[in-house]
Amino acid sequence: MAVNLQGLRNSSTSSESSAPALRVYLETYGCQMNIADSQLLGAILGKAGFSRAEQAEDADIVLLNTCAIRDHAEERVLQRVRELAALRRRAPHLKIGLLGCMAQHARAELLYKAPLLDLVAGPDTYRRLPELLGRAAFDPTVDVRLDREETYADISPDYESGVRAYVTAMRGCDKFCAFCVVPYVRGRERSVAPADLLREIRALSERGTKEVVLLGQTVNAYHYDDMDFGGLLKMVARVDGIKRIRFTSPHPSDMSDSVIDAMAAEPKLQPHLHLPVQSGSDRVLAAMGRGYDSAAYLRLVDRLRAAVPGLALSTDLMVGFHGEQESDFRATLDLVRTVGFDSAFMFKYSLRENTRAFKLGDTVGEEEKTRRLRELIDLQEQISLARNRATVGSVFDVLIEGSARRGEHRLCGKTPQFKTAIFDAAPGLRAGDTVALRIESATAHTLLGRAALGWLGSNSARTANARPEP
Ligand code: SAM
Ligand code: SF4
């Protein structure tokens, strides 16, 4: 379909044929899936002839790719829309679009909370984005249709350069946990065909990507015809040039033998798993509808640790869900101590409209949620520090990503366990190489090491875990 973009042009611009490409500034909020979606949006817009602006001030169109998971995420976006309103007073031709999960979730309120928006478009509409922008040039446009089939499998995203690429393996979620908006804003679960994933990952490998992270809200629920997630992992492991494979986030209930076997058998699969548990209280887990209790989760942890030596575990935890008593919270602290997670993302429960728990309301006050979260973070920080300190003296293969953020002559990379390691740069060490690093000190979030030169990393798959120095 021909797209009429004339209305998007600054009136001072000359005729469409001689006009430069319209510049889009794309800002991303939220999780890794949103970052991957923005790379997809970049490809769709590029193909339709738009160019990218480096900042909102230089753009003809500003698009916010948003998150709806917690109220705070939506508040941040509304604040940004207010800032953009001020920018538009100085640049009246500017068009502003709100995309993604918040567009889907808050579509009705947005009409009065952010009436200046030209476009509101949900995560399953991106294929139509150029056409929607053409319409939005003349009239405010809303498209929040969900599509049970859409996987964008035929569109190759604009991946960032770098050693790691995040590849969407499945979209949506069928779990409907009581607290969560994802199934409502991203729709039902659907998987990308294995052949499309393979094509994408081979192309990444040819461009120099060394590590692939397969993405999905419940990525291990992946299934396509006869292929389950374990089968997919084994298939991806056969792609030459890809040295490391990870995936996020798996759901504990979908952690099948097939997936655990693949993790145990395939050296390219790295010994780290982000396995969200949410709570240690069986009462709360049942109310959340998570589909497992704390004993089942702990049994799973034991199976995983037995199958994958040196496995690092991270998790998501939530405090203050509807009905959470002090004793439930203590059960979460107990589970955190029992498992000894390497790291965790920890959140205060945020009541979300449309979810199953919404009508139940909030029973834990804000102050109490803050206290519980503080206590949980303090505990996890101690555990993270202890686990990181336990690596001091060991040697890990670190895939070098580039310069460390602080310190000009330092490099950073990740261990197989996905821990950030920082070390001095040296001639011959560059991004994409794997270096054997002896850990000399550690904080709760970072390992500091020294490259054991002359004992260069294998540059092959996983040399899984800590190993003694030769
Ligand atoms: N699909 C993953 C799972 O269930 O294991 C989680 C994906 S969700 C985008 C990321 C995390 O956000 C969840 O694990 C949960 O801890 C947190 N989250 C989701 N809904 C929330 C809410 N209403 N309030 C606070 N945190 C929430
Ligand atoms: Fe949300 Fe639960 Fe689906 Fe995770 S599994 S995305 S928490 S509904």
Image: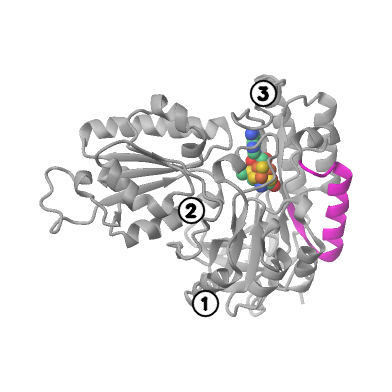
**Marks 3/1: CA–CA distance:** 60 Å
User: In this rendering, does residue 465 appear at all?
Assistant: no
Mark 1, secondary structure of its residue = loop
What percent of the width, then of the height, locates residue 101?
Answer: 51, 41
Q: Across the whole image, how many numbered discs are drawn on residues?
A: 3
Q: Which is in the foreground here, disc 1 or disc 2?
A: 2
The vertical placement of 362 against 55, above or below, is above
| Label at residue 37 | 2
Q: How crowded is mark 1: few (under 14 residues within 10 Å), some or many (20 or more)?
A: few
The residue positioned 82% from the left and 63% from the top of the image is 257
User: In this rendering, does residue 381 appear at all?
Assistant: yes
The residue positioned 49% from the left and 74% from the top of the image is 203
Q: Which amino acid does label 1 sit on?
A: Gly
Which residues fall within the magenta stretch? 290-313
Mark 3, secondary structure of its residue = helix
Q: Is residue 396 left or right of residue 15?
A: right
What percent of the width, then of the height, locates residue 126?
Answer: 42, 51
| Label at residue 428 | 1
Mark 2, secondary structure of its residue = helix
Q: Which is in the foreground here, disc 3 or disc 1?
A: 3
First in sequence, mark 1 or 2: give its number. Answer: 2
Q: What residue type is labelled 2?
A: Asp
In this figure, which residue is indicated by the disc labeled 3? 359
Mark 1–mark 2 contact, CB under 8 Å? no
